[in-house]
């Protein structure tokens, strides 16, 4: 197990480096930040000064060299827009994103597994139909649409919760509710599908044929065997949330890392983009490691 | 200020917004764009200026945007032009910065030099570009500013220079120190910024004791926040949301939209084609439909409150038949009228931008232009808008220009001089008029600007001017605040009253 | 029809491939509806721009935000008009083409590439597998919207580029799912038996493994169809993505969002069509899952009684 973790750490570092290279050069292809930081009628001299100050006049490869050199010393560079360390900016935002992701995914996982497996057991019944249909409708509606309708309905008309922002427990309800809908629908479908497959597999049939009437036992065993694809999808959804929920953050004014990344690419704030990518990538690598560990725990044959 | 939550008790105890509302002399202002910096020398950038201009950082002079009083004293009590090119400013006595140090002429000098430093990228310096300015401290409270070339509008230029203490480093600061009535008391990036009243302000004590700024990029959310009582003022909401007469105020926001034409590329090099373009657009049809009713059809790139704005210029009538005729005439003379022309619009430039450009593209196509509409994001737009221009084929750039500073000088060079970065024309008479108007003062200045506007509109047909835009502010019922033409770029808390 | 199915099937166990599929489809009323709806959508995507292209782009500011459910302005305005007075019904029909092209293109590409790589990664267990998985890690940890924004800033936001961007971002989910399933299935008795009997790797993968994991992949693909349409619409919300005058359903929802409180129909109809399309795909896929699975097929063969 330790060897596996070590191997994964090394391969993750390789992936991370690949990611840095990719983002560094791709983002610099999107344009010159001086055009965005300075007003349109700023002179060429001001632009030149801006580029000089931020080392943007060097050849890209030299810039990359400088960047890696600083990075090795733990310096992620300064934000062009905010004139302070990029890592600080990112970590501030990431704390919010992490909380949002953990809370949402916990709720989603529990709800989807419970509802999904019950639906699979009662396949074809009203419960199954309604659960599938509702989750599907929810998962198919654009989230910005749901978010705005939710604000109009629950904040403006009913006055139950605040429209947006941070500050109290109540501020979290709408963003989490909106974020909940899509992964819930997706994971529920996969749980149901996977459970159906597992229920149709020989060992469950054998157990049923042998007259094991104890539903909980069947339930637990089936679930255990149905979990592998489910965990994969949960991982995928959690990764998406760790990368920030751009739309929800934008509408609810939630200071997460998703909005930060999109704003930074709009403003060509390269150091912030890179720092954000590295922080979220690290979080996702860690999570993938946990997922692989979970695979190994669920299915001893996979252990290597 | 009646919180409408069913869970009001709990909420008031737990939310900052709720808590702020509980005390009557505090306001919450919801803005569309977050501040990256709270740096005084960047306060000409509107999102920064809205928070700090005249609230934290003050200027020597300020422009009267509520009446027509022109340039008014602020940190300077009076000024005069002592000799050609030199202005003497008499500074206010007994003013202190929020760090306790007292305000004197050295501070003004340092503030200016700081904007010119190459160790930062202060935005204010662009307004002093091409002017050689010398600041000479006569005594603590007297300052001579000499400019070459001479600046007849020096007092107006001083409305832009935010004053910082002489100890301020050249690099950007995160804790701005100013002479204004408020200090920055909290800054939680991504969440809010809070200003609080200081007790040793030199002027009259404002009614508002503290202001919290929060940021929501969605207009519907901003409007909803005032409606629910979570915010008191939303200075900018879209016309679609502005449906509550009791709360919503329309105001000219000093923005002017126009189609910039590059006269060096065919077929835009032909005056008939440019006239056809102007005649093809049914400007009236936009008002009260896609754009708010209060928007005005533009005949100049600066709003009507600017000096020299020419009331005699007739806006282009909508005449599609004549436009088609003109195009046919030009085509008969060999002008490549059927060349595909790219119309570049900027996504989200103003509320309804996409619809406006879609409609304009359809109108131009109707009279015989071959238009390819492309909506682009800000950086790509900038590539089309500023020199060096894209050269592969004719391009029309839809753009919006903001001048709330009262004088066309802040616009005309950039937009119309042969060397202006966004200028699509190269006309000797225009260059000459700009030069002369810039150097002139008083009535002569006004007359020259007026002449220039008429010449550009009627004879050069420089561009396709569209609209002077209006913005909408939503203000809670118990707040007394009227937005002005400058609300886009500054929002003085001292001007907010509480009912 | 369902009655005949019920009567004939037990008596004469013909292979369902010959006669049964339509009958089985009819037996599931939801699936029938879904199939019909999807046929309409595909028809719109193929011929919509041809038939209604002009009607969809004709502006009329007097019919701006015209209310739905009135024939005052003619049948084309039955769903109302948009902010420029263009009738919504023909716009939705015309927008089907771009929308389906983007969604189908992206899902098909990511499905094929992802599943293939996943099979290789799951079956080879060598360096190749490692390389593939790390590649998936790189893509997965690259926020999909950010990747989309960066690429669309470099390239221009055309339908083709959008397909590429969305396909890249969706590959890992197929890849990881396939690999996970392969890891599980290859240990099962029948696969090991096939291996012992000397079946070729190719045969094992395509005859034994693929059929078992396909239902899960199809389930994901149908939901991904929704995801891709919504991602496209989120890009429009952020002001990137397909730009006017081109139209997609996602763009229509995003443009209509600002009128949600004053003219709900602008965002509602295209949103409804997105929901109906993805739901139809899903209903059809769950029908297919049952119809293709020999152990489940009886549910449909005994007719609509159970459904």
Image (spheres, grey):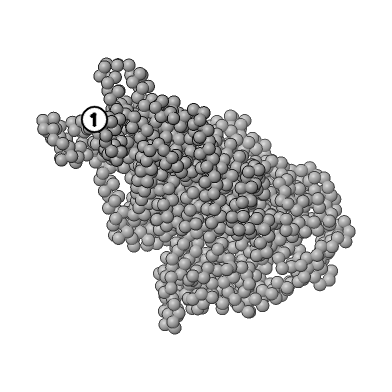
Left or right: where does residue B85 sit relative to residue A51?
right
Chain letter behind tag 1: C
Q: Is residue B275 visible?
A: no
The percent position of residue B9, horizontal first and vertical second, equals 59, 29
Per the image, the residue denoted by label 1 is C295
Residue at the farthest left position:
C11
In the rendered view, tell whether residue B372 sits above or below residue A251: below
In the rendered view, tell whether residue B322 sits above or below residue C123: below
The percent position of residue B253, horizontal first and vertical second, equals 60, 58
Q: Is residue C14 visible?
A: yes
In this view, the residue in front, A219 or C93, is A219
Which picture quadrant has residue B189? Answer: top right
Which picture quadrant has residue C188? Answer: top left
Left or right: where does residue B116 sit relative to residue B421?
right
- Name which residue lies at 40% across and 56% down: C160
- Name which residue lies at 56% across and 65% down: B385
- Name which residue lies at 29% across and 51% down: C42
């Amino acid at each position: 197990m330790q060897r596996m973790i070590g191997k994964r750490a090394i391969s993750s570092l390789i992936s991370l480096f690949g990611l840095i290279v990719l983002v560094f050069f791709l983002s610099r292809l999107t344009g010159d930040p001086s055009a965005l930081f300075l007003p349109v009628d700023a002179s060429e001299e001001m632009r030149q000064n801006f580029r000089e100050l931020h080392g943007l006049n060097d050849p890209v490869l030299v810039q990359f060299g400088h960047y890696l050199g600083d990075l090795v010393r733990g310096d992620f560079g300064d934000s062009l827009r905010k004139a302070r360390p990029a890592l600080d900016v990112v970590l501030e935002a990431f704390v919010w994103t992490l909380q949002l992701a953990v809370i949402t995914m916990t709720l989603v996982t529990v709800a989807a597994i419970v509802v999904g497996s019950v639906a699979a057991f009662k396949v074809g019944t009203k419960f199954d139909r309604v659960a599938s249909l509702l989750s599907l409708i929810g998962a198919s509606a654009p989230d910005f649409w749901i978010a705005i309708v939710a604000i109009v309905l629950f904040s403006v008309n009913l006055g139950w919760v605040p429209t947006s922002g941070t500050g109290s427990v109540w501020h979290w309800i709408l963003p989490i509710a909106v974020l909940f809908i899509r992964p819930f629908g997706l994971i529920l479908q996969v749980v149901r599908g996977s459970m159906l497959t597992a229920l149709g597999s020989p060992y469950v049939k054998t157990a049923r044929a042998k007259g094991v009437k104890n539903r909980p036992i069947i339930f637990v065993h089936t679930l255990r065997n149905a979990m592998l694809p489910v965990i994969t999808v949960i991982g995928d959804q959690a990764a998406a949330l760790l990368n920030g929920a751009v739309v929800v953050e934008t509408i609810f004014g939630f200071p997460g890392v998703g909005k930060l990344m999109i704003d930074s690419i709009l403003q060509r704030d390269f150091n912030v983009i890179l720092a954000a990518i590295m922080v979220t990538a690290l979080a996702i690598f860690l999570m993938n490691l946990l997922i692989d560990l979970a695979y190994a725990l669920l299915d001893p044959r996979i252990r290597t | 200020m009646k919180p409408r939550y069913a869970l009001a008790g709990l909420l008031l105890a737990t939310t900052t917004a709720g808590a702020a509302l509980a005390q009557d002399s505090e306001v919450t202002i919801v803005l569309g764009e977050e501040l990256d910096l709270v740096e005084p020398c960047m306060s000409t950038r509107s999102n920064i200026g809205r928070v700090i201009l005249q609230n934290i950082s003050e200027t020597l002079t300020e422009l009267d945007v509520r009446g027509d009083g022109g340039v008014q004293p602020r940190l300077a009590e009076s000024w005069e032009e002592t000799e050609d090119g030199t202005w003497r400013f008499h500074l206010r006595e007994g003013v202190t910065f929020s760090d306790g140090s007292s305000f004197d002429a050295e501070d003004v000098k340092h503030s200016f030099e700081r904007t010119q430093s190459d160790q930062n990228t202060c935005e204010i310096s662009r307004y002093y570009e091409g002017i050689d300015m010398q600041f000479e401290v006569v005594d603590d409270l007297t300052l001579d500013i000499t400019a070459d070339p001479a600046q007849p509008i020096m007092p107006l230029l001083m409305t832009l220079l935010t004053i910082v203490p002489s100890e301020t480093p050249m690099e950007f600061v995160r804790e701005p120190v100013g002479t204004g009535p408020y200090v920055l008391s909290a800054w939680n990036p991504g969440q809010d910024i809070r200003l609080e009243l200081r007790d040793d302000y030199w002027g009259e004590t404002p009614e508002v004791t503290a202001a919290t700024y929060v940021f929501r990029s969605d207009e519907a959310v901003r409007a909803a926040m005032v409606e629910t009582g979570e915010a008191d003022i939303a200075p900018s909401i879209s016309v679609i949301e502005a449906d509550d007469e009791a709360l919503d105020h329309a105001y000219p926001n000093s923005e002017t939209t126009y189609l910039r034409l590059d006269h060096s590329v065919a077929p835009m090099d032909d005056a008939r084609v440019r006239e056809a373009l102007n005649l093809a657009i049914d400007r009236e049809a936009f008002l009260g439909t896609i754009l708010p009713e209060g928007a005005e059809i533009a005949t100049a790139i600066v709003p009507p409150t600017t000096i020299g704005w020419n009331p005699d210029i007739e806006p282009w009538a909508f005449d599609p038949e004549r436009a088609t005729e003109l195009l046919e005439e030009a085509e008969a003379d060999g002008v490549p009228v059927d060349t595909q022309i790219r119309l570049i619009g900027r996504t989200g430039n103003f509320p309804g931008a996409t619809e406006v450009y879609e409609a304009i593209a359809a109108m131009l196509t109707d009279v015989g232009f071959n238009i390819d509409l492309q909506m682009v994001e800000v950086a790509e737009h900038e590539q089309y808008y500023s020199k060096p221009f894209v050269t592969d084929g004719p391009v029309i750039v839809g753009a919006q220009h903001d001048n709330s500073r009262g004088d066309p000088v802040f616009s005309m060079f950039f937009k119309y001089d042969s060397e202006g970065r966004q200028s699509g024309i190269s006309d000797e008479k225009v260059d000459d008029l700009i030069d002369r108007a810039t150097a002139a003062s008083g009535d002569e200045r006004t007359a020259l600007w007026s002449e220039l506007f008429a010449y550009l509109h009627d004879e050069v047909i420089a561009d396709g001017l569209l609209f002077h835009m209006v913005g909408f502010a939503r203000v809670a019922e118990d707040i007394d605040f009227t937005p002005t033409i400058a609300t886009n770029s500054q929002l003085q808390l001292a001007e907010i009253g509480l009912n | 029809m369902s009655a005949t199915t019920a009567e004939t099937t037990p008596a004469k166990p013909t292979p369902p491939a010959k006669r049964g599929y339509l009958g089985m489809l009819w037996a599931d009323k939801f699936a029938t509806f879904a199939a019909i709806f999807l046929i309409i959508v595909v028809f719109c995507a193929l011929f919509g721009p041809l038939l209604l292209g002009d009607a969809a782009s004709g502006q009329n500011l007097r019919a701006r935000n015209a209310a739905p459910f009135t024939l005052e302005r003619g049948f084309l305005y039955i769903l109302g008009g948009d902010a420029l007075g263009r009738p919504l019904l023909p716009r939705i029909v015309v927008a089907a083409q771009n929308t389906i092209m983007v969604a189908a293109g992206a899902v098909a590409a990511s499905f094929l590439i992802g599943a293939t790589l996943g099979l290789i990664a799951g079956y080879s267990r060598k360096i190749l597998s490692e390389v593939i998985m790390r590649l998936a890690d790189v893509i997965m940890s690259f926020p999909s919207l950010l990747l989309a924004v960066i690429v669309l800033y470099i390239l221009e936001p055309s339908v083709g580029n959008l397909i590429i961007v969305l396909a890249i971002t969706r590959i890992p989910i197929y890849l990881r799912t396939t690999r996970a399933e392969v890891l599980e299935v290859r240990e099962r008795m029948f696969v090991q038996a096939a291996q012992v009997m000397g079946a070729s790797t190719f045969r094992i993968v395509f005859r034994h493994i693929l059929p078992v994991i396909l239902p899960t992949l199809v389930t994901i693909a149908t939901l991904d169809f929704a995801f891709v349409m919504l991602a496209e619409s989120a890009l429009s919300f952020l002001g990137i993505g397909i730009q006017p005058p081109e139209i997609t359903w996602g763009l229509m929802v995003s443009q209509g969002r600002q009128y949600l409180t004053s003219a709900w129909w602008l965002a509602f109809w295209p949103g409804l069509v997105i929901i109906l399309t993805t739901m139809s795909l899903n209903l059809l896929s769950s029908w297919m899952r049952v119809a293709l699975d020999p152990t489940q097929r009886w549910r449909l063969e005994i007719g609509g009684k159970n459904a």
